[in-house]
Amino acid sequence: MIPLKDDIPSYRPPIITVSLITINCLIYLYLLSLGEGYQLALVKWGAIPFEVTHGVELTPELSSSIPLSVFSSMFLHGGFFHLAGNMLYLWIFGDNVEDQLGHAKFFVFYVLCGLAASILHIFSTPNSKVPMVGASGAIAGVLGAYMIRFPHARILTLIFFGFFIRIVAVPALFVLGFWFILQLLYALPSIGSTSGGVAWFAHVGGFLAGILLFKLFSGFSQKRYYYE
């Protein structure tokens, strides 16, 4: 399932959402300009679980702050489709969560979700020497917040049935709940893994952090919308 659009209006401009998308895209373009240095930059600024849990740098020649890498990794992407998929989800769901929390709170919320996602991934694979990069952990937090705030919102979704493709409006609770269950099912077998791949536990951690932090930040005092 690929979400395309939701039916919830936002009443103030999504300044932070657009800014985050712009920053991620600009950083990606900069990394592309590095040519062969692209991969080195991912190693330098990505979050490497082994470095964090053991407090040692695996590549001293690419020295960077280990704690800072947990933050910087949120703005790096491994390729165009990695970036495009993340930014699509942020564009669809970020504006409404930002509208509920306000610009400043939403930025803090986004960063904290990303940090929580990174930490859970790191401690689920403490000996992995593969850099973790991507905004998906932080964006998973946005999805968690959206799901509990707008469970009945209709998400225009591209669904594949074998060779057939349909676009249908699906409740957010189903789309995002199904997404979370998939992440959890893939995450459990990855505990302790030292190989590369998708950081499933980052998605799980970000999603759960998003639910908890949204409740904390909003106090459920946000605007109420009515929709069919």
Image: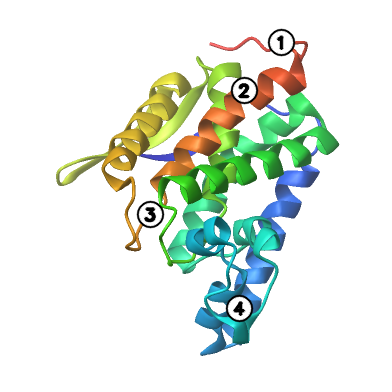
Residue 86 x, y percent position in the rendering: 52, 51
Amino acid type, residue under disc 3 in the picture: Val
Q: Nearer the viewer, mark 3 or mark 1?
A: 3
Mark 4 burial class by Cα count in 10 Å: few <14, some 14-19, many 20+:
many
Residue 119 x, y percent position in the rendering: 56, 46
Q: Which mark is residue 31?
A: 4
Residue 16 x, y percent position in the rendering: 77, 45
Give the mark, 2 or 4, whose residue is nearer the N terminus: 4
Instruction: Tell whether label 2 touches label 3 (CB within 8 Å).
Output: no
- Separation (CA) of disc 3 from disc 4: 20 Å
Left or right of residue 121, residue 191 in this image: left
Give the mark, 3 or 2, whose residue is nearer the N terminus: 3
Q: Nearer the viewer, residue 25 or 112?
A: 112
Q: Nearer the viewer, mark 3 or mark 4?
A: 3
Mark 1 burial class by Cα count in 10 Å: few <14, some 14-19, many 20+:
few
Res 215 quadrant in image: top right
- Separation (CA) of disc 3 from disc 2: 24 Å
Q: Which mark is residue 224?
A: 1
Q: Which residue is mark 2?
A: 212
**Residue 45 visible in image:** yes
Q: Which residue is mark 3?
A: 198
Q: Nearer the viewer, mark 1 or mark 4?
A: 4
Left or right of residue 218, residue 163 in this image: left
